[in-house]
Amino acid sequence: MSIVEHQTPSSLSEAYQLLQSNPDNMIIGGGAWMKLSHPKVNVMISLEQLGLNQILETSIGVTIGAKVTLRELETSPILLALADGVLSQAARSIASVQLRNIATIGGSIYGRFGFSDVLTALMVLDPVLEFYHTEAMTLNEFLLLKKPPRDILVKIIIPKSSRVARFKKVAATALDFPIVNLAVARENEQFSICVGCRPQIAALAKKAMREASNRLTHTRESLSRVVELAVEELHFSDNFRSSKAYRRHLVKVHLERLLMEVTPIEN
């Protein structure tokens, strides 16, 4: 990776203008995976002085600054108490503490990496992304864009709710990239189901979510139907970590277990 210059702006306005001044100027999140997508950078723009490293509980939910590290996601008392600590659990599953002290939530979102555990867990929490210039959008809307906006992600807002949630990463070793990862959440009768590292980027299983949410009560058989719909609608592929067939099998097994954990079962 080649970097010509490094600058640390003192305001969001200055950082935005610098970003727009040259297509080869880039924002640095934590920088952990930057070389995977940006082999040549003219000016590396650091946001360290802009106060984007706070996790706050507000009247509308939890606000996470884009410069919050994965280690801070993991250890924050606010996030440990949010939706059964699902986001903290996902962050804890990522590589080593040393790397989690570097990588940031903003970099994880803007990187849109297929292997991201954070994206999968975030997706079931219905977060809203706030940018400096671009209109706010949900994380799902952001991931569906063909190309992310050339802008600065300022914060992530997770709305208040009473949801229960679970996350699962399947990997060859504790420090390895996932073969597949999954997250589910339930708030009353409404379900969210997300599967990542298929090896494509995290995606919601919307047909399965509708099937699960259309029932007031569930049996093991009805949850198995939800799992089958999720596996049918999501696309899986082969890569050097796993085969398509094995990923589908893992999702069937672990998605049913996660759904059982968040759903009262009718006898």
Image (tube, rainbow, N blue to C red):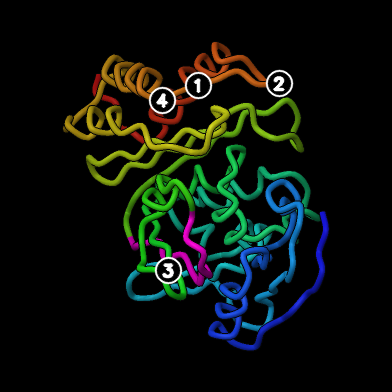
- Cα distance in 3D space between marks 1 and 4: 7 Å
- Cα distance in 3D space between marks 1 and 3: 31 Å
Provide the residue designation for mark 4. Answer: 234
Circles 1 and 4: CB atoms closer than 8 Å: yes
Q: Check the image and report above or below for 209 versus 251.
A: below
Provide the residue designation for mark 3. Answer: 130
When asked about the image quadrant of residue 42, the answer is: bottom right
Q: Residue at x 65, y 88 (%)?
A: 10
Circles 2 and 4: CB atoms closer than 8 Å: no
Looking at the rendered structure, the kind of residue marked 2 is: Phe
- Cα distance in 3D space between marks 2 and 4: 20 Å
Provide the residue designation for mark 2. Answer: 240
Q: Which of marks 4 and 3 is nearer the N terminus?
A: 3
Q: Mark 3, residues whose alpha carbon is within 10 Å: few (<14), some, or many (≥20)?
A: many
Q: Which of marks 2 and 3 is nearer the N terminus?
A: 3
Horizontal and vertical percent position of residue 178: 65, 32
Q: Earlier in the sequence, mark 2 or mark 4?
A: 4
- Picture quarter with the N terminus: bottom right
Looking at the rendered structure, the kind of residue marked 3 is: Glu
Image-based side of 203 in relation to 216, left or right: right
Provide the residue designation for mark 1. Answer: 236
Q: Check the image and report above or below for 245 versus 80.
A: above
Horizontal and vertical percent position of residue 53: 61, 74
Residue 101 visible at all: no
Q: Is mark 3 on a helix, strand or loop?
A: strand
Q: Mark 2, residues whose alpha carbon is within 10 Å: few (<14), some, or many (≥20)?
A: few
Magenta stretch, residue numbers: 148-160
- Cα distance in 3D space between marks 1 and 2: 13 Å
Horizontal and vertical percent position of residue 114: 58, 38
Q: Is mark 1 on a helix, strand or loop?
A: loop
Q: Which of marks 1 and 3 is nearer the N terminus?
A: 3
